[in-house]
Image: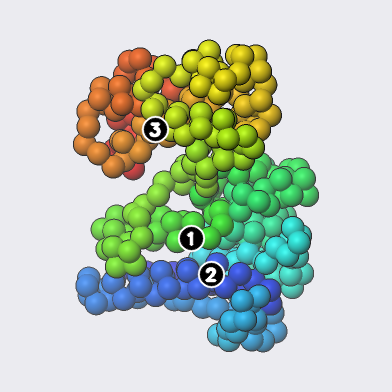
């Protein structure tokens, strides 16, 4: 097995979790390969910062790099943590951007973690690419870089040699996916179990569930309706029935629900049923017929059409993959 150099770029003001998560997972992958499989190290792990200086995160953690970024050649995989987004503004380290412009084209994989996507975009690496970032910064990314296809829903996205993740622990999900690509499913499974994390949340999983997204509703009667939809996906969820639960006319209900949740009642019901079906396919051994019934679809064929339309695969393919 050949060794791959994985470079984590460090800079002042970066989010420490974005930097430490890949370092820990890559280190664990090395230990698994050498101690369990008796193989050579699959990764040469390297950290580098502008000028080789120690860097400090907003949390107060100081990291000392291995190398000077400007003297570092393009690695197999380069990982860029997210800069801290204070006051809704994402500062971009110009030294890191300059290095990426000069070297990233020769790397096999370029990874932006959380708001690290902004750094990749500033370096001109994301034109025409589909990417994600932390949900709270997605609109700003899309406005600043209109040539980039920003999708705020998935927890990570792989578009060719570019990979990007959402915020928080989604960096671990992306790293497990990359390790699985390199070392196989068994290795990723063992690492996930060792680190007590879910193996593996698919990249298509939303940063927010449908129910969490809809908690933006202001009035209690609408929140009660949302609770009802989430816990009764197989019930009669027509607009007329839901409107009666909210003590509103269908027209008033549709207008208020859409204004306060950002989506229509029908679309919200569709998303809830799809999300329920995905969870049942991932976490249970129920037949496709029972999953369809339990998720509120009138038939397995109706569920299949919803999966094909939204995810580009059938329920059976989804279960096999995830």
Compare residues 194 and 239 and report the one nearer the observer: 239
- Between 162 and 229, the one nearer to me in the picture: 229
Give the quadrant of residue 266. top right
Residue contact between numbered discs 1 and 3, judged by CB atoms under 8 Å: no
Image point 44% across, 23% down: which residue? 306
**Residue for point 34% across, 54% down:** 199
Which residue has dot 2 on it?
Answer: 17
Residue identified by numbered label 3: 231
Q: Which badge, 1 or 3, comes first in the chain's sequence?
A: 1
Q: Residue furthest front?
A: 247
Q: Label 3's element?
A: helix
Tell me where residue 288 sits by quadrant. Answer: top left
User: Where residue 303 appears, x then y in whole percent?
Assistant: 37, 22
Which numbered disc flags the more N-terminal residue, 3 or 2? 2
> Which image quadrant for residue 35?
bottom left
Give coordinates of residue 87: x percent, y percent: 76, 61
Residue 71 rendering spot, x and y as whole percentages: 65, 81
* N-terminal label among 1 and 2: 2
Q: Where is residue 150? Give x, y as percent.
A: 65, 43
Checking the image for residue 169, the label placed there is 1
Q: Quadrant of the N terminus?
A: bottom left
Q: Are marks 1 and 2 in contact (CB under 8 Å)?
A: yes
């Amino acid at each position: 097995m050949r060794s791959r150099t994985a470079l984590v770029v460090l800079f002042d003001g970066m989010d420490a979790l974005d930097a430490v998560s890949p370092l820990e997972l890559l280190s664990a992958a090395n230990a698994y390969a050498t101690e369990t499989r008796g193989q050579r190290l699959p990764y040469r792990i390297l950290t580098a910062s502008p000028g080789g200086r120690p860097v400090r995160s907003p949390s107060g953690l100081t990291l000392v790099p291995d190398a000077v970024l400007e003297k570092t050649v393009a690695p197999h995989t380069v990982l860029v943590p997210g800069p801290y987004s204070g006051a809704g503004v994402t500062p971009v380290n110009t030294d890191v951007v300059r290095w990426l412009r000069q070297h990233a084209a020769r790397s096999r994989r370029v990874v932006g973690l959380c708001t690290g996507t902004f750094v990749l975009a500033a370096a001109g690496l994301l034109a025409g690419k589909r990417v994600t970032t932390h949900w709270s910064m997605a609109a700003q990314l899309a406005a600043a870089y209109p040539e980039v296809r920003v999708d705020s829903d998935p927890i990570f996205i792989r578009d060719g040699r570019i990979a990007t993740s959402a915020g928080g622990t989604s960096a671990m999900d992306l790293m497990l996916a990359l390790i699985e690509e390199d070392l196989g499913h068994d290795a990723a499974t063992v690492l996930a179990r060792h680190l007590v994390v879910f193996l593996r949340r698919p990249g298509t999983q939303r940063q927010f569930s449908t129910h969490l997204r809809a908690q933006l509703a202001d009035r209690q009667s609408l929140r009660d309706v949302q609770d009802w939809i989430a816990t009764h996906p197989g019930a009669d969820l027509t607009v007329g029935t839901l409107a009666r639960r909210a003590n509103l006319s269908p027209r008033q209900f549709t207008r208020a629900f859409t204004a306060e949740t950002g989506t229509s009642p029908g679309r919200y019901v569709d998303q809830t049923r799809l999300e329920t079906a995905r969870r049942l396919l991932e976490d249970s051994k129920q037949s496709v017929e029972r999953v369809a019934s339990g998720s509120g679809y009138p038939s397995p064929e109706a569920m299949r059409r919803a999966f094909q339309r939204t995810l580009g695969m059938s329920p059976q393919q989804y279960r096999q993959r995830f």
